[in-house]
Image (spheres, rainbow, N blue to C red):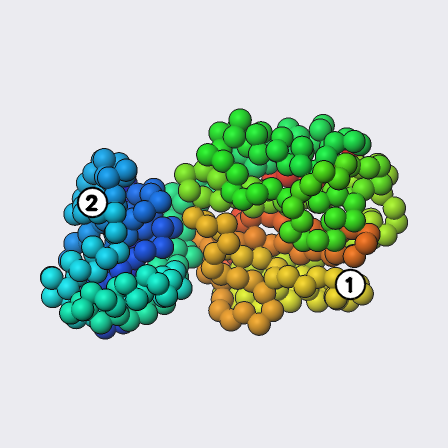
Amino acid sequence: MPEMHAARRARAQEKIAALGCDAALITSLPNVRYLTGLVSSNAAVLLPASGPAVLATDSRYAEAAARDCADIELVSERGTEIALAALAGRRGARTLAFEAQEVTVERYEALQELGRGPQLVPLGRAIEELRTVKDETEIALLTRACAITCAAFAGVLPLITAGRSERALALALERAMTDHGADGPAFASIVASGPNGATPHHAPGERRLEPGDLITIDCGARLGGYHADMTRTVALGEPAGWQREIYEVVAAAQLAGIAAAVPGADLEAVDAAARDLIAAAGYGECFQHGLGHGVGLEVHEAPIIGYGRTGTLMDRVPVTVEPGIYLPGKGGVRIEDTLVVRAGAGAAGAAEILTATTKELLVL
């Protein structure tokens, strides 16, 4: 889709010009993909404030670049960023913005050693800011990734039985996502059973599921570069009173967070909508991570919804809402959806929830 990528580069060029730089060197691979469509483990883009871009990659990807990015000048070099920085200097660029959040000190020093090359200026997260608001093509890919995630989750529910290990369940879930058409998992799936549920990012191990466990499953499919993210907590056998209590608190908090996720909403206020409810129930100290994050070409990207975060939500921004309660030594509950903030007919709007799996407590 050359036109779509050309439009994205044009918006990026406006930011480069506003910064007062002659050109920008884009080295973050998700940002390269966003601006060109090229999927590569070694690529960079030279984007002047005005005029055509130059894409650099090595011989492993040159044929794919020539095929998929035919509207962009191509340079085939192993050292992509050095080649493009030198080219910028030869073409008269005096200032070159670079992605300081991505470039290592070693690579920065190599760029500095170009001698009479352009002056390096931090670009900031300008491209990530452009990526925050998604077009309908991106949202369609994300919607399909979420549908695959839900189908795979439903497919492995019969496997949640006493004696099966966390790791075996995680592997089965990732195979199911691929079987349903995913390019692969969006991230390493989390299966946290019993007391392991008190660790938000527990790595699934050899612990075997037991009757009486709450089991938190955090998973997502990746499709066309776009990452789904969903968490459900299920019970193996009839849950105890304390388990139902924390599940109901988290479920109510999650609904409150989703309701607050409208265009124009302050990020901290969205977080507070869920966090304050959990705190009022007496579990404030048991929820210490952010409420959610953006999703797209990366599974964690802007905006970050959390305490102390500044900024507001906008129309067509996909985010997660994922409150949790974690009780050390006992277990935990997290419920997470991927949703798209949408403008409605009124002043606010309503979120479009992409992960449609039930949030009723499943007792297996």
Q: Secondary structure at mark 1?
A: loop
Tell me where residue 244 appears, x and y as whole percent: 82, 48
Query: Is 33 displayed left or right of 308 in the figure?
Result: left
What separation in Å lies between label 2 and label 1 (alpha carbons)? Answer: 56 Å
Give the crowd class for mark 1: few <14, some 14-19, many >=20 residues within 10 Å: some
x 57%, y 43%: residue: 188
Q: Is residue 334 above or below residue 100?
A: above
**Residue 153, disc:** none
Indicate the quadrant containing the N terminus: top left, top right, bottom left or bottom right.
top left
- Count of numbered tags: 2
Give the crowd class for mark 2: few <14, some 14-19, many >=20 residues within 10 Å: some
Q: Nearer the viewer, mark 2 or mark 1?
A: 2
Where residue 214 sits, quadrant-wise, is top right
**Residue 76, disc:** 2
Q: Which residue position is annotated with label 1?
A: 283
Q: Is residue 220 above or below residue 316?
A: above
Res 203 visible: yes
Query: Is 285 displayed left or right of 302 in the figure?
Result: right
Indicate the quadrant containing the C terminus: top left, top right, bottom left or bottom right.
top right
Tell me where residue 172 appears, x and y as whole percent: 62, 30
Q: Is residue 123 above or below residue 36?
A: below
Given the image, on which type of amino acid does mark 2 rest? Answer: Ser
x 24%, y 39%: residue: 59
